[in-house]
C-alpha cells in the first residue's frame, strides 16, 4: 500500500510538472528555435513505406495526435528579449503547426481531394512553392535538364516508379463526399497521363527502363481515373469549408487580419472601384484608336523584351527598387512565345495588347531569383512556408505592383493600357468573390465560374474555359488563395501608409520596397510588425 501511495504521488507530481507552466523551456535563443524548426520539418513528413509516403488515414491521424506535443514545445520557448524578426520566426512555425491541425481536422485532402494525388508537375509556379496543397513525393519535371544525364535518368526513373504505389493509396484513402472537388479532380488526374506522355517524348530514346516506368505510371493513373469516375455518381456533398472555418484558417494559419466577411467586403469594394475607374478611363479615351492585339511574332517578342528593359530602367531611374544583376535574366527567361491564333485566355488578352502591363506582375520572378541568390539569413524563411502561408506577400505584392507602378508613372503616355490595369483588378475581384461564396457553400463551382465570367470585363474570360475552371478549383483546394491577390494588396497598401507615417520625413519609396523584400516571403501582417514596430493585434 505504501508503494502504491508513493507511486501515485510520483505520478501526480510528474503530471503537474508536465503542464505548460512548469515545462522546462525548449530554448531561450533563436538558434535553438532554428534547430527546433528543422526537427519540426522532419516530423511533418509522413513515414515512408517502400519508398512511398504513407498518407493513409491511420498515418495522418497519428501525425495529428502527435501535434499537441510539438505545439507545447514551441510554446515553451522563452522569447524574452528576442528581436522582432526572431519573434516573427516563432510565429511562422506556429502558423505551420496550425496549418497541419487545420489540414487534419477540416481539409483532409487525402480523403476529399483526388487532385491531391497528382505527382507530376511540368511547369514552375511563379510563387515560392506550388499553388495549392500537395503531398510529399511530388515530381517537378521542370527541375530536370533535357536531354537527361545518366544520373538524372536513373533518379527520374526511380521517382516515377513510386507513382503506382502512391496512387494505390487513393482508392482506399478517398472516402469524402465533396462533389465539386471529386469531379474536378478527375480531370486533373487524367491530365497526369498526358503529362507523363510528354515526359516520355522529352526523354525520347534515353532509357527503355525509364519508358517502362512511365508506362506503368500511366496505367496506374488511368486505373485511378476509371475508379474515380465510377464513384462520382455517389458524390453529392458541398465542397466548401464554411465561413467559420475559413475565418479560423485566415487568422491562425495565414495570420491575416481579415475574416471571411472582411474579405468579401474588400473584394466587393475592389470590384466596384475597378469598374468605376475602367468606365471613366474608357470615356476619357473614347476618341483614341482601339487597342488591338499584337498580330505578329517579331513585334510580340520585341515588345516583351522591351518591357523587361523598361521595367528595370524605371525602377532605377525613379529610385523605386534596388536593381540587382539577377533581375534581368529572371524576367527575360519568362518572355512568352507568340500564338498565331491570338490571345486565347484572359491574361493573354492583356499581354497581347501591351506586354508592359503584366510585366509588373512578373515581379514574382524577381522574388524567386532573390530567394535563390540572396536567401534570407533565417532558415525559417529561406524555405517556402507550408500551406501557401506566403500568399498575401507573394500574390499581394505582384498584384499591387500593377496599380502602384501605374500611379508611379510607369505607363504614362499609354492611356489604353491604364484600362488594362483596371480590367485586371476587376477580374481578380470577381474570381475572389466567387471563391468566397464557394467556401460559404452558397455557390457550386459552376455557379462561381459563371459569376467570374460574367463580371470579368469585355467578355475576356471564356465560359467554362480551362482558366476559370482551374482558378475556382484551386480556390476550393486552397482557402484564401483566390482572395490573397487583393487582400494581400490591401494589406501592403496599408503597410505603406503606416510605414511612411512612422518614417516621417525620412520615408522613401525605395526604402519601403527594399525593406519589404528584406523580410522575405512571409505574411504581410508580420512584415508590418518588422517594418513599423507595431505588433498586429490579431497575433495576441
Image (cartoon, rainbow, N blue to C red):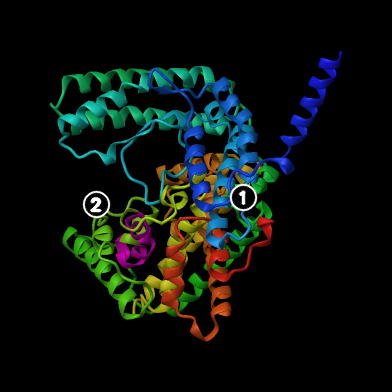
The answer for how far apart the CA atoms under marks 2 and 1 are is 39 Å
Determine crowd level at label 1: few under 14, some 14-19, many 20+ residues with C-alpha closer than 10 A.
some
Q: Quadrant of residue 5?
A: top right
According to the picture, the residue beneath numbered tag 2 turns out to be 339
User: Which mark lies nearer to you, 2 or 1?
Assistant: 1
Q: Position of residue 503 (x, y in %)?
A: 54, 79
Question: Going by the image, does 129 lie left or right of 447?
Answer: left
Element marked by disc 1: helix
- Count neighbours of disc 2 (C-alpha within 10 A) and say few if under 14, some if 14 to 19, many if 20 or more: some
Q: Is residue 64 visible?
A: yes
Instruction: Note whether 534 is above or below 446 in the view shown.
Output: below
| Label annotation for residue 446 | none
**Lateral position of residue 393 relative to residue 292, left or right:** right
Residue that lies at the very extreme toward the bottom in this rendered image: 505
In magenta segment, residue 354: yes
Q: Position of residue 1 (x, y in %)?
A: 87, 13
Residue that badge 1 annotates:
250
SS for dot 2: loop
Q: Which residues are magenta?
A: 352-371
Q: Where does residue 399 sit, x and y in percent of width and height?
A: 45, 62
Tell me if I can see residue 230 in this picture. Answer: no
Q: Residue furthest front?
A: 2
**Residue for point 38% across, 21% down:** 51
Q: Is residue 535 above or below residue 154?
A: below
> Residue visible at 28% across and 75% down?
313
The quarter of the picture where residue 242 lies is top right
In this rendering, the answer to whether 162 lies above or below 369 is: above
Amino acid at each position: 500500500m505504501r508503494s502504491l501511495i508513493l507511486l501515485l504521488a510520483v505520478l501526480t507530481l510528474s503530471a503537474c510538472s508536465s503542464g505548460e507552466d512548469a515545462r522546462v523551456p525548449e530554448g531561450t535563443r533563436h538558434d535553438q528555435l532554428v534547430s527546433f524548426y528543422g526537427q519540426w520539418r522532419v516530423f511533418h513528413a509522413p513515414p515512408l513505406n517502400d519508398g512511398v509516403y504513407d498518407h493513409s488515414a491511420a498515418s495522418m491521424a497519428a501525425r495529428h495526435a502527435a501535434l499537441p506535443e510539438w505545439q507545447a514545445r514551441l510554446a515553451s520557448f522563452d522569447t524574452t528579449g528576442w528581436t522582432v524578426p526572431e519573434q516573427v520566426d516563432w510565429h511562422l512555425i506556429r502558423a505551420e503547426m496550425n496549418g497541419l491541425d487545420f489540414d487534419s481536422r477540416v481539409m483532409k485532402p487525402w480523403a476529399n481531394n483526388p487532385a491531391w494525388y497528382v505527382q507530376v508537375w511540368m511547369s514552375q509556379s511563379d510563387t515560392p512553392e506550388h499553388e495549392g496543397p500537395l503531398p510529399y513525393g511530388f515530381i517537378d519535371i521542370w527541375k530536370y535538364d533535357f536531354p537527361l544525364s545518366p544520373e538524372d535518368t536513373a533518379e527520374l526513373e526511380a521517382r516515377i516508379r513510386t507513382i503506382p504505389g502512391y496512387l494505390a493509396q487513393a482508392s482506399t484513402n478517398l472516402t469524402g463526399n465533396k462533389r465539386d472537388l471529386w469531379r474536378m479532380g478527375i480531370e486533373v488526374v487524367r491530365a497526369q497521363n498526358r503529362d507523363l506522355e510528354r515526359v516520355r517524348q522529352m526523354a525520347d530514346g534515353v532509357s527503355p527502363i525509364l519508358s517502362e516506368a512511365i508506362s506503368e505510371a500511366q496505367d496506374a493513373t488511368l486505373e485511378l481515373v476509371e475508379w474515380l469516375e465510377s464513384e462520382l455518381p455517389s458524390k453529392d456533398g458541398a465542397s466548401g469549408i464554411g465561413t467559420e472555418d475559413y475565418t479560423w484558417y485566415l487568422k491562425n494559419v495565414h495570420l491575416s487580419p481579415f475574416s471571411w466577411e472582411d474579405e468579401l467586403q474588400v473584394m466587393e469594394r475592389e470590384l466596384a472601384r475597378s469598374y468605376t475607374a475602367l468606365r471613366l478611363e474608357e470615356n476619357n479615351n473614347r476618341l483614341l484608336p482601339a487597342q488591338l492585339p499584337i498580330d505578329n511574332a517579331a513585334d510580340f517578342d520585341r515588345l516583351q523584351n522591351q518591357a523587361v528593359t523598361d521595367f528595370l530602367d524605371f525602377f532605377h531611374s525613379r529610385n523605386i527598387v534596388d536593381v540587382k544583376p539577377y533581375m534581368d535574366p529572371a524576367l527575360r527567361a519568362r518572355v512568352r512565345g507568340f500564338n498565331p491564333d491570338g490571345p486565347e485566355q484572359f491574361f493573354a488578352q492583356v499581354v497581347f495588347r501591351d506586354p508592359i502591363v503584366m510585366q509588373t506582375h512578373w515581379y514574382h520572378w524577381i522574388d524567386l531569383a532573390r530567394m535563390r541568390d540572396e536567401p534570407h539569413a533565417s532558415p525559417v524563411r529561406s524555405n517556402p512556408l507550408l500551406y501557401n502561408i506566403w500568399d498575401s506577400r507573394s500574390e499581394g505584392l505582384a498584384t499591387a505592383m500593377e496599380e502602384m507602378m501605374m500611379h508611379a508613372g510607369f505607363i504614362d503616355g499609354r492611356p489604353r493600357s491604364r484600362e488594362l490595369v483596371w480590367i485586371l483588378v476587376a477580374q481578380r475581384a470577381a474570381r475572389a468573390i466567387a471563391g468566397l461564396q464557394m467556401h460559404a457553400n452558397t455557390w457550386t463551382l459552376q455557379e462561381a465560374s459563371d459569376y467570374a465570367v460574367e463580371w470579368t470585363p469585355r467578355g475576356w474570360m471564356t465560359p467554362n474555359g480551362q482558366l476559370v475552371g482551374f482558378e475556382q478549383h484551386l480556390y476550393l483546394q486552397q482557402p484564401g488563395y483566390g482572395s490573397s491577390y487583393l487582400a494581400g494588396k490591401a494589406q501592403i497598401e496599408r503597410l505603406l501608409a503606416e510605414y511612411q507615417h512612422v518614417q516621417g520625413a525620412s520615408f522613401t519609396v525605395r526604402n519601403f520596397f527594399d525593406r519589404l523584400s528584406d523580410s522575405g516571403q512571409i505574411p504581410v501582417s508580420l512584415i508590418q510588425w518588422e517594418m513599423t514596430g507595431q505588433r498586429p493585434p490579431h497575433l495576441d
